[in-house]
Image (cartoon, grey):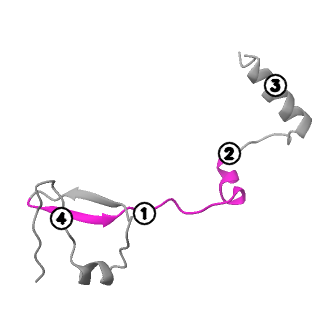
Amino acid sequence: MNTTKLSSKGQVIIPKSLRVAHHWEIGLELVVVDTGDGILLKPKKPFVKTDISMVASCLKYKGRPKSLNEMTAAIGRGVKGGFE
């Protein structure tokens, strides 16, 4: 069993054997979960890398595709306050 101490600044050193086993490196962000009788440390998961083809389908636009000129004009109207 590994043990550690809480410092006066609230810091805890995670034993090297555990850091190595879990591949935790310097700068890793951890999520702290209160379990009621203690805490659980879990690595913060970054967002999955995506590209436009993976997310564009969420828009669900039904209608005629807009041309680049139409999109540019709509943006121009929005900049001028024409969203009304």
Q: Nearer the viewer, mark 3 or mark 2?
A: 3
Contact between marks 2 and 4 (CB within 8 A): the answer is no
Residue at the location (86% across, 28% down)?
73
Q: Amino acid at mark 1?
A: Lys
Q: Nearer the viewer, residue 22 or 66?
A: 22
Q: Distance between the Cα atoms at labels 3 and 4? A: 54 Å
Q: Amino acid at mark 2?
A: Leu
Q: Amino acid at mark 4?
A: Val
Q: Distance between the Cα atoms at labels 3 and 1? A: 38 Å
Q: Distance between the Cα atoms at labels 3 and 2? A: 21 Å
Q: Which residue is mark 4?
A: 12
Q: Distance between the Cα atoms at labels 1 and 2? A: 25 Å
Q: Secondary structure at mark 2?
A: helix
The quarter of the picture where the N terminus appears is: bottom left
| Residue 48: image location, x then y, percent | 54, 63
The outermost residue toward the front is 8
Q: Distance between the Cα atoms at labels 1 and 4? A: 21 Å
Q: Which mark is residue 45?
A: 1
| First in residue order: circle 1 vs circle 2 | 1
> Badge 3: how crowded within 10 Å, few (<14), some, or many (20+)?
few
| First in residue order: circle 1 vs circle 4 | 4
Q: Which mark is residue 76?
A: 3
Q: Amino acid at mark 3?
A: Gly
| Residue 15: image location, x then y, percent | 21, 77
Q: Secondary structure at mark 1?
A: loop
Q: Nearer the viewer, mark 2 or mark 4?
A: 4
Tell me which corner region of the image, top left, top right, bottom left or bottom right, holds residue 74: top right
Magenta segment: 37-59
The answer, for residue 67, to whether it is visible in the render is no
Q: Which mark is residue 59?
A: 2
Contact between marks 3 and 4 (CB within 8 A): the answer is no
Q: Distance between the Cα atoms at labels 2 and 4? A: 45 Å
